[in-house]
Amino acid sequence: MTAGPVAGPWPGITVELLIMIIGAWAVVRGALEVASALKLRQGDGARYVAAADRGLVVVFGLVMVLYPNLDLWTLVRLLAADALIVSTLMFVLARRFAKGLRP
């Protein structure tokens, strides 16, 4: 409730701060998920695919933290590219796990 009156007078700063918070969240979450992916006991390189997938999230978060004044169009393209790459790597990872789970 208090965010609205605070964001009203300073919308530019609010957007930059929100982008930085989302970027920091992505960096921390991505780093923790890279660490957990490397601890997987799955062979056949699946853990490296999972680590690469989460590594891209860390890069995405770093871009957002380092460049918080991105315009909206650049931010949308960055989010779309991240979603496309991450979903492709998740598909590869799912295929690898499916191969390992078959009898």
Image (cartoon, grey):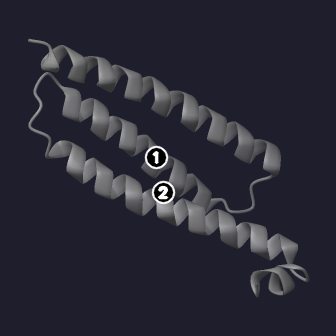
- Point out residue 9 in the picture as x, y percentages from the top left corner: 91, 83
Q: Residue at x 86, y 86 (%)?
A: 5
Q: Tag 2, which secondary structure? A: helix
Of all residues, the one furthest to the front in this rendering is 103
- Quadrant of the image for the N terminus? bottom right
Q: Which mark is residue 26?
A: 2
Work out whether 68 lies above or below 41.
below
Residue 85 percent across, percent down from the top left: 50, 29
Is residue 61 shown above or below 46?
below
Query: Is residue 13 shown left or right of residue 103?
Result: right
**Circles 1, 2 touching at the beta carbon (< 8 Å):** yes
Mark 1, residue position: 57
Please tell me whether residue 12 is drawn above or below residue 93 in the rendered image.
below
Quarter of the image that includes the C terminus: top left
* Amino acid identity at mark 1: Val
Percent x, y of residue 48: 23, 33
Q: Quadrant of residue 90?
A: top left
Q: Amino acid at mark 2?
A: Ala
Give the residue drawn at x 66%, y 63%: 19
Q: CA distance from mark 1 to mark 2?
A: 6 Å
